[in-house]
Image: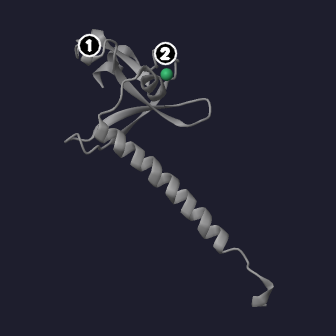
């Protein structure tokens, strides 16, 4: 959050602009926190993240001068990942959303008028 104030809300790599914050809760965090989202060219919601310029695994610090704003796809491309639990949570939500859509589609199909034998 502080990073976005200091570093801006634009992805340092592709220039995607964060346009809104969403309050979200992940299992691995005790408190709900705000996540920054923007829209890509296709109109899809893209999560913007605070990235460590120099990964912590390579001795990078949590200081703001080691922070940059990256969108999800750029961050994943770079190889940094969410903590596994968060990642799993996001994957689950995406899957749930897909399943819901599929279920609705199935329902719609089954409600379509059926064969002449009913007439
Ligand atoms: Zn990007």
Residue 28 in which image quadrant:
top left
Q: Is residue 37 left or right of residue 113?
A: left
Q: In the rendering, which numbered label is found on residue 58?
A: 1
> How many neighbours does mark 1 have within 10 angstroms: few (below 14), some (14-19), or many (20 or more)?
few
How many numbered marks are there? 2
Residue sitting at 42 percent across and 24 percent down? 75
Label annotation for residue 74: none
Residue 81 image offset from top left, x and y in percent: 35, 29
Viewer-side label of 2, 1:
1
Whether 36 is drawn above or below 99: the answer is above
Residue beneath label 2, please? 13
Task: Give the CA distance from mark 2 to mark 1.
Answer: 21 Å
Q: Earlier in the sequence, mark 2 or mark 1?
A: 2
Instruction: State the image quarter where residue 54 is shown.
Output: top left
Q: Residue furthest top?
A: 65
Mark 2 CB within 8 Å of ligand 1? yes
Which residue is at 41% across, 44% downward? 91
Q: Position of residue 60 (x, y in %)?
A: 25, 12
Quarter the N terminus occupies: top left
Q: Seen in the image, is 60 located left or right of residue 117?
A: left
Q: Residue at x 51, y 59 (%)?
A: 100
- Circle 2 packing at 10 Å, graded few (<14), some (14-19), many (20+), is few
Q: Nearer the viewer, residue 30 or 76?
A: 76
Residue at horizontal 36 percent and vertical 24 percent from the top: 80
User: Which quadrant of the rendered structure holds the C terminus?
Assistant: bottom right
Secondary structure beneath disc 2? loop
Would you place residue 66 above or below residue 26 in this image?
A: above
Mark 1, secondary structure of its residue: helix
Q: Is residue 38 left or right of residue 69?
A: right
Write down the quadrant of residue 87 in the picture. Answer: top left
Q: Is residue 32 above or below residue 47?
A: below
**Residue 9 higher or lower than 85, as above or below:** above
């Amino acid at each position: 959050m502080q990073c976005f104030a200091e570093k801006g809300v634009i992805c340092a790599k592709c220039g995607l602009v964060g346009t809104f914050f969403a309050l979200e809760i992940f299992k691995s965090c005790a408190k709900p926190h705000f996540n920054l989202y923007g829209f890509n060219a296709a109109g899809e919601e893209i999560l913007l993240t605070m990235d460590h310029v120099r990964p912590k695994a390579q001795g990078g610090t949590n200081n703001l001068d080691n922070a940059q704003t990256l969108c999800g796809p750029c961050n994943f491309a770079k190889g940094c990942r969410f903590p596994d639990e968060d990642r799993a949570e996001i994957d689950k939500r995406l899957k749930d959303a897909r399943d819901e859509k599929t279920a609705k589609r199935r329902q719609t199909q089954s409600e379509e008028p059926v064969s002449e034998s009913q007439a």
